[in-house]
Amino acid sequence: MTRQISFTRLEQAAAPGLRDRIDKAESTEDVRKIFAEAASMLLSDALGQPGSVRYEDVSLSPGEPDGYALVPSLLQAPSFKDTWEGSDLPRIMATLARGAVNRYHHLDKHPEKTQAKIFHHKQGKR
């Protein structure tokens, strides 16, 4: 039986802040940016190398089965691949992406709310 590394501690530390930021996102692009930033930091922390996973390496992909995508070069890097395949990181990423994808779809279905918020911000109202 192979041993699996658990990063649940990192998930529990990152999830509340990510949820809060996602809930406050005003556009689908904001949701994408927030997710990519949080996910890249979580993956870097899991590797024990801050900044090793760049913002550009992770993206929210609502059309994908797990809701996110990683660049192929990251998945092929030996240090990342070993950690990825021997841990619960795929499950954690799917869980985090699920909430972001839900918010993304909500904002995508109701663009009038986004436009109203942008208009109010420009008018100095909140």
Image (tube, rainbow, N blue to C red):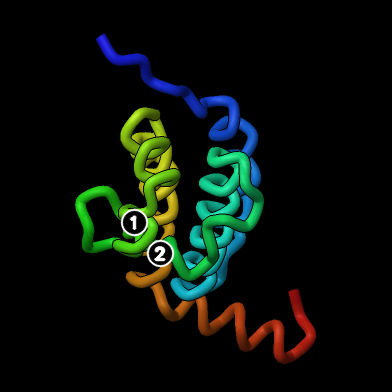
Q: Give the residue pinned by disc 1.
A: 68
Q: Looking at the picture, does residue 19 appear above or below residue 62?
A: above
- Which quadrant of the figure contains the N terminus? top left
Q: Amino acid at mark 1?
A: Tyr
Please report the residue visible at 36 percent of the width from the left and 72 percent of the height from the top.
Answer: 108
Q: Which residue is nearer to you in this view: 119 or 23?
A: 23
When asked about the image quadrant of residue 100, the answer is: bottom left
How packed mark 2 is, by other alpha carbons closer than 10 Å (few <14, some 14-19, many 20 or more), is many
Q: Could you say where residue 78 lies in the image, as x and y percent from the top left? A: 38, 47
Q: Looking at the picture, does residue 13 appear above or below residue 28?
A: above
- Which quadrant of the figure contains the C terminus? bottom right
Cα distance in 3D space between marks 1 and 2: 6 Å
Sequence-first disc among 1 and 2: 2
Pointer 1 with pointer 2, Cβ within 8 A:
yes
The furthest residue to the top: 1
Say if residue 58 shows up in the picture: yes
Q: Looking at the picture, does residue 106 appear above or below residue 121?
A: above
SS label for mark 2: strand
| Labelled disc at residue 59 | 2
Please report the residue visible at 38 percent of the width from the left and 20 percent of the height from the top.
Answer: 4
Q: Which residue is nearer to you in this view: 92 or 51?
A: 51
Q: Which residue is nearer to you in this view: 98 or 13?
A: 13
